[in-house]
Amino acid sequence: MHPQAEKIQQALQAAGCEAQVREMPDSTRTAVEAAQAVGSTVGQIVKSLVFVLDPPGQPILVLVSGSN
């Protein structure tokens, strides 16, 4: 497993979350690719966007439907 994926897996476990990080063999860079990789529709994919406000430089995480 990639070191960053392992780091996320450890953080999930430390928080008591039973989720499992999985690395995909093919690209999942776009919502379409991600849907194809897991056998779902694009609307079932969640895209994450991170914005950093200026000021104060705080990150904002936005989760949106893959079809939007």
Image (spheres, grey):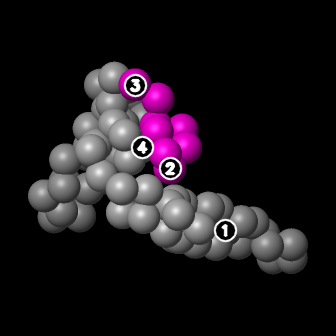
Mark 2 to mark 1 CA distance (whole Å): 22 Å
Mark toward the start of the polypeptide (4 vs 1)? 4
Lower position in the chain sequence, tag 2 or tag 3: 3
Rendered residue at 54%/38% (across/down): 29
Is 4 left, or right, of 60 in this rendering?
A: left
The amino acid marked with disc number 1 is Pro
For the residue carrying disc 2, how many other residues have a C-alpha within 10 Å: few (<14), some (14-19), or many (20+)? many
Q: In the rendering, at what x and y percent does residue 16 appear?
A: 16, 64
Residue behind mark 4 = 34
Amino acid marked by disc 3? Asp
Task: Report x, y in % for residue 45.
Answer: 41, 58
Disc 3 target residue = 26
Residue occupied by mark 2: 31
Q: CA distance from mark 2 to mark 3?
A: 13 Å
Q: Is residue 30 magenta-colored?
A: yes
* Residue 43 to residue 3: above or below: below
Q: Pointer 2 and pointer 4: residues touching (CB < 8 Å)?
A: yes
Q: Tell me which segment is drawn in magenta.
A: 26-33
Q: Amino acid at mark 2?
A: Ala
Left or right of 44? Residue 48 is right
* Numbered disc 2: secondary structure: helix
Residue 33 horizontal side relative to residue 36, left or right: right
